[in-house]
Image: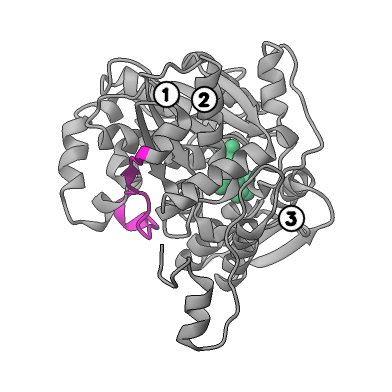
Amino acid sequence: MTEQLRCVLCRQTYPVGEVRYECDCHGLLAVEHPPAAWQGVDTELFDSRQRGSAEIDLSGVWRFREVVRALPPAAIITHPEGATRLYARAALCRYAGLESLHFKHEGENPTGSFKDRGMTVATSQAVAQGATAVACASTGNTSAALAAYAARAGLQALVFLPAGKVALGKMAQTLAYGARCFAVRGDFDAAMRLVTDVCRTLGVHLLNSKNPFRIEGQKTIVWEILQNLAWDPPDWIAVPAGNLGNTSAFGKAIEEAVAAGWIKRAPRLLAVQATGANPFYLSYAAGFRTRHRVQADTIATAIRIGDPVSFDKARAAIEYTRGVVTEVTDPELMAAKRMIDQSGLGCEPASACSLAGVRKMVAAGVIARGERVVCVLTGNLMKDPDAVLEELPGVASVAKPVEIEPTLDAVRALLAPGGRPG
Ligand code: F0G
């Protein structure tokens, strides 16, 4: 028995080897692992692998391989990814209004975002299926990860980016790793529709999170958080939400961890959108009776998405975990980013939604002061260097460099009274 693909809407199944990204009914597909795959796969096995030295065990994705994707080890394309750290910072705890707050820093992945976790699985699967070319639409991080994994595997990489809306660091990475880049005159949603057509008609493998193997890789963010906390689950996990791949993956990870008996109770999910790109929040606020779509605009370009692809899976994730969806304004998320940056951790704007959303939910009484919370920081500070210098009303600016003559007097004159630091 091996994995199969199952439609989340009509429950139809397809063989795992079939190249397809949706059901005949257009529902999203999810990877389903056979009961045998879960046997003997437990927290002790994962902990022993974490202490090991094999590349495949050091990967925070492939450490969980039996229930991610059962491929022969030689077929696995890894950098290796994951194994990111969990941080606690007193100043950020105070800022959120909590007693216990941790940050899972996914910016520590090889290309600087959580996308590497999904990409190692989807690329390995594509190669196993005989792919020669892979493609995605992206706001920048998926394209950087795709380009890096395609380069490692010797595949042609085609990426479709919203013209003029991709942060500098991400664009630089994507080009440097050697992808063919198409700047689409339109937004991410237009690029997503285009890449879907390209893949369907030109026989290119689609590596967006509609690809169910991406979701299998991204599940491991949650499993690693649980492992970092010695399998004592937090009360809440907060995550920025754009195309909703992560929200979906987190729901699946929690459901599977409970079913496997690795944890006794399910953490609740907090999915956080930017107010300018809030279709999931609007749908949640309307009791999920309608699926909203918006024309998206936010300073957090990573999540500038108006028609999220993984809507149905993400809705199920929120419902299963008794989760909450909220929204934060650009000044709120940038203020949270400044706090994270000044703590020395640093992140890109979209990542700071998690902290801004937690702070808002604590203030609203949705999250209690004594509850244990983990915020996921999805991307590295260096992804978006322009955002560091951005000026927004009500948000403290960074101190700009001061040009001086190369003399001690020039330095003294600019320091505090008395000419000494401090
Ligand atoms: N944070 C960052 C840094 C991202 O790059 C993304 C998505 C998200 C959060 C949202 O995650 O889509 O799973 O809800 N970036 C995609 C990209 C869209 O193309 O890089 P999601």
Q: Is residue 119 visible?
A: no
Amino acid at pointer 2: Leu
Closer to the camera in the image, 68 or 312: 312
Magenta-drawn stretch, dominant element (helix, strand or loop): loop
Which residue, given by chain and number where applicable, does mark 2 sit on?
Answer: 270
- First in sequence: mark 2 or mark 3? 3
User: 10 Å neighbourhood of mark 3: few (<14), some, or many (≥20)?
Assistant: some
Where's residue 193, x and y in %?
A: 76, 44
Beta carbon at label 1 within 8 Å of ligand 1: no
Where's residue 304, x and y in %?
A: 71, 43
Q: Secondary structure at mark 1?
A: strand
Q: Residue at x 39, y 21 (%)?
A: 267
Q: As drawn, is 191 to the left or to the right of 149?
A: right
Q: As drawn, is 70 to the left or to the right of 185?
A: left
Which residue, given by chain and number where applicable, does mark 3 sit on?
Answer: 165
Q: Is residue 264 magenta?
A: no
Circles 2 and 1, Cβ within 8 Å, touching? The answer is yes
- First in sequence: mark 3 or mark 1? 3
Amino acid at pointer 3: Lys
Amino acid at pointer 1: Trp
Which residue, given by chain and number where applicable, does mark 1 sit on?
Answer: 236
Q: Residue at x 38, y 57 (%)?
A: 78
Look at the image and tell me in which quarter the N terminus lies: top left
Magenta-tinted stretch: 72-90
Closer to the camera in the image, 5 or 91: 91
Q: Ligand 1, what quadrant?
A: top right
Q: Quadrant of residue 284?
A: top right
Position of 37 relative to 117 (above/below)? above
Q: Residue at x 40, y 58 (%)?
A: 77
User: 10 Å neighbourhood of mark 2: few (<14), some, or many (≥20)?
Assistant: many
Q: CA distance from mark 2 to mark 1?
A: 7 Å
Beta carbon at label 2 within 8 Å of ligand 1: no
